[in-house]
Image (spheres, rainbow, N blue to C red):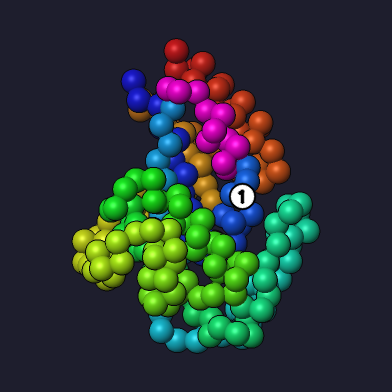
Amino acid sequence: MKNELFYIHDPMCSWCWGFAGAAKQLFNSLPGSVTVHRLLGGLAADNDQPMPLELQKSIQENWRRIENKISGVKFNFDFWSVCQPRRSTYPACRAVIAARLQGDEYDETMTARIQQAYYEEARNPSDNETLIELAIDIGLDQHRFRSDLVAEASQKILMDEIQLSRELHADSFPSLVFKAGDSVWPVAIDYLDASPMLELIEMFLEMEE
């Protein structure tokens, strides 16, 4: 029987950035019988329009809440003055897919590089040129990445992952869903400590034995 943990996220989701430390701790502590599947939930569709000011203010307030809740997580608020924000995360999601096509290990690497660029370096991952620069940073084949970033096949993979996320009832990001055989359980996110999530998964495993 397959034991699967689905991690549903978006590289431009600020709470996913806040969750990165606890997520890494959790994934490194899982029993060997559990396979982690990273799914892109697609927070915001393609959009060339500037982000409304009210939404900009709301997201900045969210950044401050995350900084207050999770020790060590910091945001570079220069982003809001040096970039032209757009409510568009699909390009960053497709960038993770394009990276993954050059090796599964690049999924996590590209996600982390996008988060670093966005939240620490005040660069805009809604722009394809920024994403191409980040792909070069992590050692990807630039020409293949450029092609895959805008390919219909990459968009289809993204839409398939969004659909699967919905079927798993992952309606917010980040989300964790554990699947063993025909049984599916949500795993409550703990941003501060991996232990409660690990204990819950181990309990689910025991229930299925």
- In the picture, measured across the screen, residue 1 lies left or right of residue 187, that is left
- In the picture, measured across the screen, residue 97 lies left or right of residue 42, that is left
Residue 207 image position (x, y, % from top left): 50, 17
Q: Nearer the viewer, residue 126 or 179?
A: 126
Q: Nearer the viewer, residue 53 or 63?
A: 63
Mark 1 is surrounded, within 10 Å at the Cα level, by few (under 14), some (14 to 19) or many (20 or more) other residues, namely many
Q: Residue at x 66, y 46 (%)?
A: 191
| Stretch of the chain drawn in magenta | 23-33
Q: Residue furthest left?
A: 152
Residue 154 image position (x, y, % from top left): 26, 61
Please identify the dominant SS of the magenta region: helix
Residue carrying label 1: 19
Q: Residue at x 55, y 22 (%)?
A: 202
- In the picture, measured across the screen, residue 97 lies left or right of residue 28, that is left
Residue 43 image position (x, y, % from top left): 46, 64
Q: Residue at x 61, y 49 (%)?
A: 19
For the question of whether residue 159 can be seen, the reply is no
Residue 186 image position (x, y, % from top left): 51, 38
Q: Quadrant of residue 81?
A: bottom right
Q: Residue at x 56, y 21 (%)?
A: 203
The amino acid at mark 1 is: Phe
The N terminus sits in image quarter: top left
Q: Secondary structure at mark 1?
A: helix
Per the image, is 152 magenta? no
The C terminus sits in image quarter: top left
- In the picture, measured across the screen, residue 27 lies left or right of residue 96, that is right
Is the residue 36 above or below the residue 108 in the image? above
